Image (tube, helix red, strand yellow):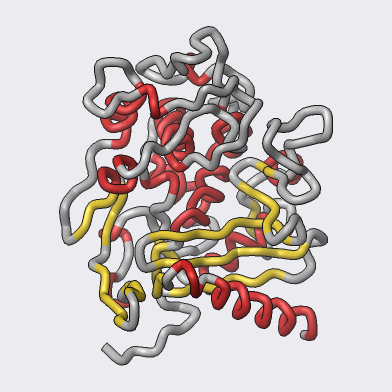
Amino acid sequence: NKIPFTTSTIMNIASISKTFTGVCIMKAVEEGKVSLDEDINNYLPFKVINPYFPSEKITLRHLATHISGLTDRFPFYGDSTYCYEGRKPEALGAFLKNYFVQGGKYYSIDNFLNAKPGTNRDYSNIGAGLAGFIIECQTGKTLIEYAKKNIFKPLKMQNSGLTLNEIDITKHSKLYEKKGDSIVPIPLYEMTTYPDGGVRTSVDELSKFFISLLNDGKYKRTRILKTETVKEMLRFQYTETNKPENVNIKKLNQGIFWATKLGATRIGHNGTDSGVRTFMLSDLNKEFAVIVFFNTKLDEKDEGIYFDIYEELYKYAKEL
């Protein structure tokens, strides 16, 4: 529509959404509704059992640090969780039960890794979906309601939400994908597993959220989490004596849906989705931070352009 993209333009932010799920988890921890180290089967209305390690418990900490042994089965996971052009997503709990419980229509042994929880890092979108559902079960609110109460309203993120009907579509960017020499528009979509990538917001409003995390839970006079809660969320969970076997902590570490990036020189989260590439990263000292949205998904060979632009913005931030 030839409308310039600005810092108030709304767009889905892909996996940066997991940091919102992380804050909801930590808020539920504050309220005594969940523990990071409790067996998730004590919270769920159905049992999640890894058939390779049926007696081993899986915890929210495992889910939030991608070491649960639960995995995204592609192409099924991607094909079945995205809903385009007004098609409504399946209920989150029903989808998860069908995916993880033997006899469910989506169940497969390939939904699990042959790895004991805690021993192998495998980035898991479905694990984030399950974590969000646990918060729903334990708080009695949908994640949408819980995030609105504890994040969006306090931070006055009035143009942010987890569904299309929560935001002003006229302020939402169109999405595109580069295919060969063509730029192809992509219809707006929603997700069955919205805790892993469903948040829509603007650079302006996401900045309030990011600042609050980098500032021990506080944005100006508004506090969304206690200082000690944020410290636990952002704390590097992997150590030399307690880390997944496939991780070098000098190159990668992990908080509660929070991670080191770019060779462990930045902290925060990135996002990649259909028509979407997003960055929300700070230096390790939390002094310089950059948020940047791209509403066009490039070919894999052109991915470096995103990082080049991010680094130019980061240099600019340091010079301010």
Quadrant in which the N terminus appears: bottom left
Q: Whole-percent x and y of residue 152?
A: 48, 56
* Up/down of 99 relative to 15, above or below: above
* Up/down of 166 relative to 234, above or below: below
Q: From this viewpoint, is residue 300 visible?
A: yes
Which residue is drawn at the image coordinates 78% and 79% (left, top)?
A: 318
Q: Nearer the viewer, residue 237 or 155?
A: 237
Q: Whole-percent x and y of residue 298?
A: 43, 72
Q: Whole-percent x and y of residue 90?
A: 23, 39
Residue 110 as seen in the image, left or right of residue 164: right
Q: Nearer the viewer, residue 136 or 179?
A: 179
| Image mark count | 0
Q: From this viewpoint, is residue 173 visible?
A: no
Which residue is drawn at the image coordinates 55% and 77% (left, top)?
A: 305
Q: Residue furthest top?
A: 55
Residue 22 as seen in the image, left or right of residue 267: left
Which residue is drawn at the image coordinates 41% and 70% (left, top)?
A: 297
Quadrant in which the C terminus appears: bottom right
Which residue is drawn at the image coordinates 75% and 36% (left, top)?
A: 238
Quadrant of the rendered image containing residue 291: bottom right
* Up/down of 209 relative to 26, above or below: below
Q: Whole-percent x and y of residue 295?
A: 40, 74
